[in-house]
Amino acid sequence: MTTYTAALDLEDALALPTACPSCGHEPLRPVADGDRSNLLCWSCGRCWHVEMNWTSRVDPHACGTCTQQEACLRLVDRPRE
Amino acid sequence: MTTPAPGAEGLTLVQGSTLCRSAASGDIVPWHPQGLFVRDVRALARWELTVDGVPGELLRADVDEPFAASVLLHVPGDPEGARHGSLLVTRRRFVGEGMREDLVVRNSTARPTTCRVALTVAADFADLFAVREGRGRGVAVTATPGSDALVLTAPEHDHVVTVGANGEPVVHADGFCWEAHVPAHGEWHAGVSVEPAVAGRRLTLHHPRGQDATPSHPVRRARDGRADAPRLETADPDLAAVLRRSVEDLGALRIVDPEHPERALVAAGAPWSLALFGRDALLTALMLLPLDRGLALGTLKTLASFQGAVVDPDTDEQPGRIMHAMRFGPPDSLAPGTRDRSYGTADATALFVVVLDELARWGAPLEEVADLLPHADRALGWIEQYGDADGDGFVEYRRATPRGRLHQGWKDSLDGIRHADGRPAEPPIALVEVQAYTYAAYLARAHLADAVDDAVTAERCRRRAAELRRRFHAHFWLPERGWFAVALDGHKRPVDALASNPGHALWAGIVDEEYASAVAAGLVSPALFSGWGVRTLATSMGAHDPMSPHNGSVWPHDTALCIAGLVRYGFTDEAQQLAMALLRTSGALGHRLPEMFGGFDRAETGRPVPYPTACAPHAAAAAAPVLVLRSLLRLDPDVPRGTVTCGPVPPAELVPLRVSGLRIGSATVDVAINGSGWSVTGLQGTPLRIEALDVPRR
């Protein structure tokens, strides 16, 4: 008889990503911008938004109410060395 | 990775409080539940693209990411006209605080060509929920064309949306038109942006025109493949597949309280209900307790922190009341008369107490439960002071203002509660399931009091529960009908429709044994059981409509609660029948149970009929199979008392069946069933003991 299996790790499914998708640094720091909660990497300065099981990079130019916006903009606008 | 979007279902994109729903071609067609919605208001009601007057033929449509999609259209040539060769049109769309669409027209021929690209645009600023329910007419809008933008305004409602375009379009009051010169083997490009304003401030697009969109990635979890995580093994492919899909979908619905990101929370459903809804969140968390206690704890803590404190008619807030819905973020929803929070729910407050007790039964730390007990007492205080405003012993609802929710149970559409002959019930309305939840809440509070030797509270709550139970049977049972009334109306008359609601009364345990068999028979009768699940309203009722959300459709979470109630009262055959129907429904729907589906008879349609604006994924629907599984296991832990009751009654199709890694208190428990019997392991060395439930109560 065939046996069908399912991993039911709901705790893991509900966990927020802990590592930066870009540099791998842990942990990510939750920050808020209006109706969006994002995850900021203190190591590389990239900020991430998680929605519907997808992680996308946040453009700090669009983060009008986040207290971290200035720091993120400085990082983004910094000339490449 | 892309997900093909079936043409019949169209395209749905979400980001935060922005939702875009269109035909698969990308067009937003008037008079359909489509549009670009920003903060609960429809900023675009029409968005139709033509080339030389012809809408393109859809070649493919892909949802690339939750907020981005690509559409490829074919526009045939016109051998008798100016343009001989065919064209390919690509629409690439991004949403987030508005919308951006990039248009590309590609000429694959060796001759340059010219075509007329037209985009028809309109707004109506209709309320999102009204549109979903098919009653969104919107408001009068003034269109003001500029040199490269069209401004759509409804000044009396303070709504403005600016649609800007490049590529030197001609701007009309109804949209844009480009004279597109497309070189041989070349492309023509244009970009359009839709930017709503809130309180005079234009929102910042997350994906502005002219900027490359950053690619995104599937979420990588920290602990993929934990060895000790809960796991299922079964002989039934549908059970395994629907549970796998449910866990994935619940992860997709994860939302974050910016103040407490560590608290697990899920939205009610996508795309329409990406917000925290009290009732949905509590029922979902309760159903999922066998897999995770963290969601229940996060949900309870969050709802406790927003528990009502004052009387506010605008939001239906009252002291002790658990909220109906809230969206984290800016308070300035664009929808008229709405706030970021509303409290118009009659059942979430009782469910809060029920879930807290269930959490304790599954072994949540006592200090966590103790922190929430004052909120449970405030919830019971609301039930007695505000919920039962007229002092008749039942919790009833009536909205405080015309802007509030007319119906405040789970059947909350405008026509959600009706008499058998189809007449609408008049408020204040006391729903059958709300009394049942209230009964369960009193017993839950008594049980919580037992755990801390608070005999006074326990006795008081049990006394109230017993009194409610007595009055419930006296007022809700309809001897001439042979079923429970769905509600009492504003004149205290029974609302005598045959509906699924009394199934919840079985689940909550308020029904006396002598009436239970009638409820069970009703749930599996041809009038209520469609063959796929339990209809919200029986086919014999005056208001029955298989495509009405609360007057004939089937809701998986509703059916699951009925199954749990049937098992509770020992109606195993009936519970198994409904359980297998729900599993086969999932199989017919790609193993994603939607919020609801049509209540057509299985013999009539052969497949479940989708409901066009149902949420999918939907949290409570995704959680429903977990409750079904737990019910069939008859697994009831009571960690404060040191017992785990179990007595599996799964349908033969599911066996052999094994569920491992279940967390009960500090134990990790496995339940296994095969042809010769069942076993529970993992309790050795713990303070817990197994109590076998071998014989159905009946």
Image (tube, rainbow, N blue to C red):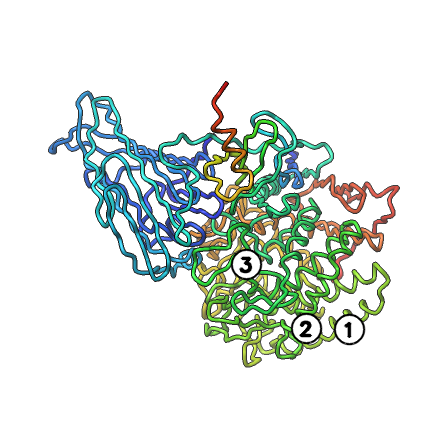
Residue in the image at 70% along x and 65% along y: B378
Callout 2 amino acid = Glu
Instruction: Check if mark 2 and mark 1 are on a common chain.
Output: yes
Q: Considering only order in the chain, which callout, 3 or 2, is on the residue closer to the N terminus?
A: 3
| Count of marks placed on residues | 3
Instruction: Choose between B104 and B591: the one closer to the eye.
Output: B104
Residue that mark 2 sits on = B384
Secondary structure state at the residue bearing disc 1: helix
Residue in the image at 21% along x and 47% along y: B172
- Quadrant, the C terminus of chain B: bottom right
Tell me: residue B342, above or below residue B692: below
Residue B299 screen position, x and y as percent: 65, 52
Instruction: Check if mark 2 and mark 3 are on a common chain.
Output: yes
Label 3: few (<14), some (14–19) or many (≥20) C-alpha neighbours in 10 Å:
some
Label 2 to label 3: alpha-carbon separation: 23 Å
Q: Considering only order in the chain, which callout, 1 or 3, is on the residue closer to the N terminus?
A: 3
Q: Nearer the viewer, mark 3 or mark 1?
A: 3
Left or right placement of residue B609 versus residue A12 in this view: left
Callout 3 amino acid = Arg
Residue that mark 3 sits on = B341
Residue B520 at least partly seen: no
Which chain is home to disc 1?
A: B
Q: Which mark is residue A64?
A: none
Tell me: residue B477, above or below residue A61: below
Q: Considering only order in the chain, which callout, 1 or 2, is on the residue closer to the N terminus?
A: 2
Q: Nearer the viewer, mark 2 or mark 1?
A: 2
Left or right placement of residue B15 versus residue B323 in this view: left
Residue B347 screen position, x and y as percent: 61, 64
**Callout 2–callout 3 Cβ contact below 8 Å:** no
Which chain is home to disc 3?
A: B
Q: Which mark is residue B463?
A: 1
